[in-house]
Amino acid sequence: MATAHPNLFSFPSTDYLAQQLRGYVLRAQNAALTRHDTFRLAVSGGSLPTVLARALLAPSNGSPEDTPQFAKWHIFFADERAVPLDHEDSNYRLLKDELVSKIPSELGAPTVHAIDANHVNDDDPQELADLYQEELMRSFAAKDSVKLPVFDLILLGCGPDGHTCSLFPGHELLREKDAWVAAETNSPKPPPKRITLTLPVVTHAVSIAFVATGAGKKDILKKIFDQEEGRSIPSALVNQGGGEKVSWFTDHPAVEGISFPRRGSL
Ligand SMILES: O=C1O[C@H](COP(=O)(O)O)[C@@H](O)[C@H](O)[C@H]1O
């Protein structure tokens, strides 16, 4: 378990947050391209894709460092709902509508790794999870040759109950040590059937960022950052496992009243 603390950033507006997030994501991209000429990231659904689109679709300052090289991006999902890809609850659809379909063609197109839509109606989403794990193995090498995949970046949300990916408070999936991708059959937040990256995969990434904005996140962030009782909340477990690799992008209303030290710039 990491002992270093996560970085808590708080910004006066979502526009400024998006600007800072752009710099952070592109730094992760540039470092990844230097390491292996590809940028492998996992993204969440919920409120994240809208902020991410605002960050990445903003005009570049023209420098190579500030230019997304989308053709070299491999985008996976931190979690996905067991629904068809054109369903309104699909995280794939959300990312496509908010970001991918709006990328100007001169910036290239990312490779987006969707779930296998042939299995979204299965009673048990385990096959869907296994197939997505195999999809990861094709990109990151077989599970028996590497213990865990190493994403260059994982972008997370934090629900009002502190869930992240589809890892919910008190759930046995939080203790999963072996699988890379797990099935959730009874999510407390609809839709009930989902798949999710597991905690060891999330905390093994090179960089991990949460985006959490608005006063609706204030109470759960206070628990996660300031209170002992918040230590077992899924998003807090990412903080504990990832330590200083974890950065939180928040706005002022989301962190009002929190004593944990925060910074206003990267
Ligand atoms: O159900 C989900 O919720 C979380 C949090 O969403 P937010 O709207 O509160 O940001 C999200 O990160 C996850 O991907 C999604 O499936």
Image: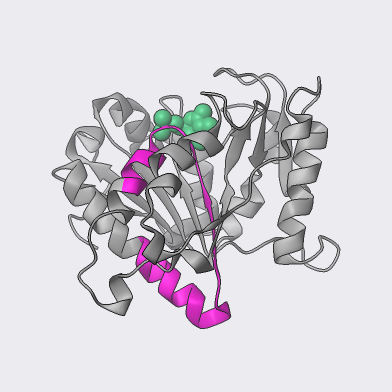
Residue 244: image quadrant is bottom left
Looking at the rendered image, the quarter that the N terminus falls into is bottom right
Residue at image x 62%, y 46%? Answer: 199
Q: Nearer the viewer, residue 167 or 94?
A: 94
Span of residues in magenta: 25-53
Q: Main secondary structure of the magenta part?
A: helix
Q: Nearer the viewer, residue 55 or 154?
A: 55
Q: Is residue 143 left or right of residue 6?
A: right
x and y percent of residue 96 in the render?
A: 48, 41
Is residue 32 shown above or below 253? below
Residue at image x 36%, y 43%? Answer: 211
Verify whether residue 46 appears in magenta.
yes
Verify whether residue 10 appears in magenta.
no
Can residue 233 be seen here?
no
Most extreme residue toward the left is 12
Q: Is residue 54 left or right of residue 37?
A: left
x and y percent of residue 213 in the render?
A: 28, 36
x and y percent of residue 169 in the render?
A: 56, 27
Residue at image x 53%, y 59%? Answer: 2
Most extreme residue toward the bottom is 34
Residue at image x 52%, y 68%? Answer: 72
